[in-house]
Amino acid sequence: MTDTPAPRHIPDRLDKPLTSAIFSWEALLVAVAVVIFAVNSFASPYFLDAWSLSDLTFNFTEKALIALAMALLIISGEIDLSVAAIIALASTMMGMAVQAGAGTPVLVAIGILVGLGCGAFNGLLVTRLGLPSIVVTIGTMSLFRGIAFIILGDQAYKGYPSSFAFFGQGYVWWVVSFELTLFLVAAVIYWFLLHRTSFGRRVFAIGNNPVAAQFSGVRVGRIKFILFCLTGLMAGIASVLITSRLGSTRPSIAQGYELEVITMVVLGGVSILGGAGSIVGVVLAAFIMGLVTFGLGLLNVPGIVMSIFIGLLLIIVIALPIVWRRVRQERFT
Amino acid sequence: MKALPRYREVWLLAAIVVLIGLISMRFPGFANPANLRQVFNDTSILMILALGQMVVILTRSIDLSMASNLCFTGMVVAMLNAAHPAIPIPLLIVIALLVGLVLGAINGLLVWRLNIPSIVVTLGTLTIYRGATFVISGGAWVNADQMSPDFIGLQRAAFLGTPVLSWIAILVIALFFLLMTRTALGRSIYAIGVNPKASVYAGIDVGRTKFIVFCISGMAGGLCGYLWISRYVIASVEVANGYELNIIAACVIGGISIAGGIGSVGGAVLGALFLGIISNALPVINISPFWQMAISGSAIILAVVLNARGERRQGRIILKKAEAA
């Protein structure tokens, strides 16, 4: 018998130099957020006010809730373009329930369950039939919103019970809204799920190499299915919040949200090609987008012009590190 | 093997014939040549856009900014026409093509030079181009009474009994057919979609080719900017809002694989026609137009399910041939 060599010490994680933390994506986002915050407070005297800042959060919490689940989905290499349509369909179903005399708990349950059901439908099409998610969800996007249009046409549902208004308009404590609280709690849950559980590691594994993940015993299809369900669930929750905030349902509700949610996720440093990203980045990106739109809103900049800033922000934040790396490489070679 | 690519288009054509047959049962006038010509004319813009999108999708990219490009370019030519009615329309069309080309080139440069995924680039430019429309117009509309009669009338003028708009679409279809089947660029576009790495070894400049396809889709968007505005005679920031997904839907129904490398000019044209027929037929057979969205959504899902079957079958046959050899 020969002596087996002593097992070499394998560190849990590689030692990172401090510089990598300074130049990390999250640090870049924090810097951007601080700059926008400072510019905003100089540009408008109304910005630095507890209630203003509280109003600011209503700008993004609903989209950011979906972005949390979408981040996991995109990390796994899939995408869901139907989230805004899910909001419309769930809201329409809640509206129908109100006409039938349903109370607040039933409404919330319907909103969340419809979202979950739509997510499961996407998940089944993608994982069972092996279809590309971008095309499937373009289809279900038309289908879900189309059903809302068939049911509602050019009408609107109103008359939600007053207790239902709490979810989108209520405050938990002082200026801290229910929406913000829910978002922060969800962010912690998703952070834990992605960065501290084996489920999260599997999501990364699938995104980096689905075939290798499959051979390593990861149930790729099942995990992707769960991620689609989670995204649908979050869209259902967002639907409850938006419907409660607006107090009415139109089939055009939340139009175009899907692109804003994806912008948030990509801005947060999640690779659109899958396999990389962090929840902290997504949360920071959500705050940045909220700061930009709210700050420009205080300056009376129209919404459509704000979207230019969001678009530029997206491209510049993605392009900067690439340009920076290239300039440094050229200097050393 | 050679019959397989045509297979898909034949099935789609059959589906369209069945669709027209079903509609005719409830509205006998629908299958009239005059009415079908009208449907073709109504679908011309979508066909041109779908062809532009097709070359992009074939290279495993996507252009989400086409509708915003259309909106911006349409506003530019409408404002030019309103301010200087003396500018001849052919020159305006050239300007529309050039403006579209520049917008497409911006997408292409970001994809080529910085290697940013096209979905991210065009997601950004989608909002930027539409926002820029607001900036140049100040949010104002250009109405029919501000446009010159030629500007509105050109595409409606009949040539050999068919509106000029249809002829433009036929010309564009012919150009794309030549591009995809008779040029080295067309072959490179397919090659990149099938296998980007092998394309590099085959001497194809993948980045430059991607740049070119975005220029092509930009020009298609620009041309349709003029066509759309002169057809619906109003230019505003809301023009073609959300239409980018209809364009992709036409491509998907036409059997163009989102994974790249699979698709044909005939498929894109038929896919657009399929959607055009549905939107034209709903009012005449007394179905609320609110049904249209759900129907096209179902058509997309059905098409992608069937296409996936077709692609899988293709793979199996290759394997069988390899076994037999």
Image: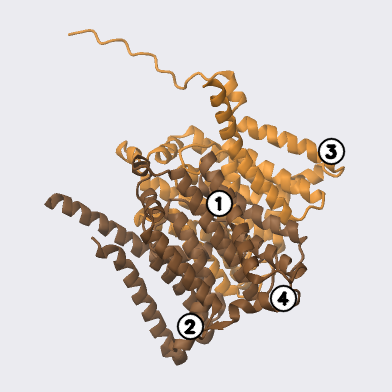
N-term mark: 3 or 1:
3
Q: Nearer the viewer, mark 2 or mark 4?
A: 4
Q: Residue at x 52, y 49 (%)?
A: B119
Task: Give the answer, above or below, for where B305 lies relative to B38.
Answer: above
Q: Colour of chain B?
A: brown
The chain to which mark 3 is attached is A
Work out whether residue A287 can be spotted. Answer: yes
On the image, numbered disc 1 is attached to which residue?
A234
Spot the orange chain and give its letter: A
- Marks 3 and 4: CB-CB under 8 Å? no
Q: Would you say residue A110 is visible in this rendering?
A: no
Residue underneath mark 2: B37
Residue at which label 3 appears: A42
- Looking at the image, which is closer to me, B14 or A53? B14
- Whether residue A220 sits left or right of residue A163 in the image: it is left
Number of the label disc, if any, that sits on residue B271: none
Q: Quadrant of residue B219?
A: bottom right
